[in-house]
Image (cartoon, rainbow, N blue to C red):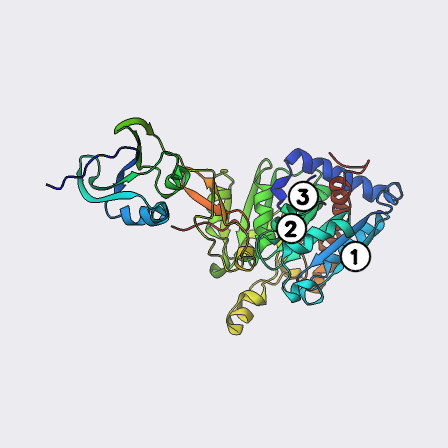
């Protein structure tokens, strides 16, 4: 039995197979419509989420399975002080697979150690969000054909954004990837990403402040939200919030085939006018997230359609 | 000249950095052994200038050398039996250490579920970096 805690839990070749399965599900949804008949997914969400939880639920429903769970800690036994270990021990009796989101880092790992059924980390604090990374990789591969020879710009909150850290770490395993890291001084990537991932693997990268300057060089622009909850000072948040706004004018500096991605939710960092630009793929990206989660569920449940 | 006699059975921990013997004693929980221990500090050393030493009279197998390897793998260990050195045991940084240090990340699950073992793994041997098994926060010495 396997769990998914980090995007690095799968080898590059396993990821390729998983994405192949995701592509096939997208093309032939009817083939998989009953693949999980009679099976149940438990979504144990100890903190709020819109996209991730509904994406998991949609994935299981499209496979013919059913879903149960809770969407905030207050409506579970956690409010009574029950530990993650105890909650998960009985989940095996209720569901065949569990997706867990928790504000405490490492909580999904504790769940996986105590679980009789596969556990998927659906986000743990600022630590990992592996299914978002799978979604990002799957989207990049779908749009470019192969994950290689790309200049990828990551823009916004590179300090606290867990999706950015996971994505850089995952992309570091592919050939000829270059990064342009676009952020204000205050929100640059943490040292451990710079030292342990980029420098250690000899990945070419540059750190810049100006989005305009970076635009013409990029094959992919991955925008991120400045997260209000990370700031102690509202004034500072408001200043940072307006630091990068991708609009039509900036898009005019980009390559004709550049792609804009965003893990969503968006606040104001991408102007809604950009949504109509054929290079805006962030809503498509959210849709891809359902297919890759379907592939993941089929694989972890070891169904006949498993990717590996 | 201060003279400390040899031991019949046990361990001599040598080449401890000067001033660190008390910390080693504490971190190794040697007080729980209830045996005879000599702590010798600021001894002249050709290699280190000054060094500390610990002589521990106890049955062989009583102390956890993995923990000692984590504290400082440059310490040298002589294992003594019948007043003779029967082995010079090299120390290595252990791959895993359990319940020796605690995670300081306030967002780590170990802060709320305190029955969990505190487990750290060796993430980077060259730079001697240990990370929490749960949240992967780096342990700062």
Secondary structure of the residue carrying numbered label 3? loop
Name which quarter of the figure residue A177 lies in: top right
Can you identify the residue that label 1 sits on?
A: A68
Residue toward you, A147 or B4: B4
Gap between marks 1 and 2 measured at Cα: 17 Å
Check whether the beta carbons of the residues at disc 1 and disc 2 lie within 8 A of each other.
Answer: no
**Label 3 – label 2 distance at C-alpha:** 10 Å
Separation (CA) of disc 1 from disc 3:
19 Å
In x, y percent, where is residue A127?
Answer: 57, 53
Q: Position of A77 compared to B29: left or right?
A: right
Residue A155 in view:
no
Q: Residue at x 69, y 51 (%)?
A: A89
Q: Chain of mark 1?
A: A
Q: Chain of mark 2?
A: A
Find disc 2 in the rendering and name its residue: A111
Instruction: From the top left corner, tell me how far across and down residue A204 is, in percent.
Output: 51, 41
């Amino acid at each position: 039995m396997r769990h998914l805690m980090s995007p690095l839990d799968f080898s590059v070749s396993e990821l390729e197979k998983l994405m192949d399965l995701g592509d096939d599900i997208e093309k032939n949804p009817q083939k998989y419509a009953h693949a999980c008949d009679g099976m149940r997914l438990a979504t144990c969400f100890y903190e709020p989420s819109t996209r991730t939880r509904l994406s998991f639920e949609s994935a299981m429903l499209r496979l013919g399975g059913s879903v149960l769970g809770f969407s905030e800690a207050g409506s579970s036994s956690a409010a009574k002080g029950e530990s993650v270990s105890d909650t998960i021990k009985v989940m095996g009796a209720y569901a065949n697979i569990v997706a867990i989101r928790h504000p405490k880092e490492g909580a999904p790992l504790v769940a996986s150690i105590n679980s009789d059924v596969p556990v998927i980390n659906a986000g743990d604090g600022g630590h990992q969000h592996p299914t978002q990374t799978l979604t990002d990789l799957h989207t990049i591969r779908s749009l470019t054909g192969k994950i290689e020879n790309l200049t990828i710009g990551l823009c916004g909150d590179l300090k606290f954004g867990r999706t950015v850290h996971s994505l850089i770490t995952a992309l570091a395993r592919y050939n000829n990837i270059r990064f342009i890291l676009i952020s204000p001084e205050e929100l640059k990537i943490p040292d451990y990403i710079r030292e342990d991932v980029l420098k250690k693997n000899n990945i070419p990268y540059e750190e810049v402040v100006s989005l305009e300057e970076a635009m013409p060089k990029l094959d992919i622009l991955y925008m991120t939200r400045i997260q209000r909850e990370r700031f102690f000072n509202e004034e500072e948040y408001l200043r940072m919030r307006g630091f990068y706004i991708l609009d039509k004018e900036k898009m005019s500096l980009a390559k004709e085939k550049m792609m804009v991605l965003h893990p969503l939710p968006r606040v104001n960092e991408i102007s809604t006018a950009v949504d109509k630009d054929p290079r805006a793929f962030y809503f498509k990206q959210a849709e891809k997230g359902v297919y890759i989660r379907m592939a993941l569920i089929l694989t972890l449940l070891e169904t006949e359609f498993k990717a590996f | 000249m201060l003279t400390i006699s040899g031991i019949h059975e046990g361990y001599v921990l040598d080449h401890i950095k000067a001033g660190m013997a008390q910390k080693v004693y504490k971190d190794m929980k040697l007080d729980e052994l209830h045996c005879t221990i000599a702590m010798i500090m600021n001894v002249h050393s050709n290699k280190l200038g000054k060094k500390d030493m610990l002589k521990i009279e106890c049955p062989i197998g009583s102390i956890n050398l993995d923990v000692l390897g984590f504290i400082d793998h440059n310490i040298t260990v002589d294992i003594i039996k019948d007043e003779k050195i029967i082995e010079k045991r090299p120390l290595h940084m252990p791959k895993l250490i359990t319940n020796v240090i605690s995670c300081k990340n306030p967002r780590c699950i170990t802060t709320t579920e305190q029955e969990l073992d505190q487990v750290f793994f060796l993430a980077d041997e060259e730079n001697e970096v240990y990370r929490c098994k749960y949240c992967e926060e780096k342990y700062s010495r």
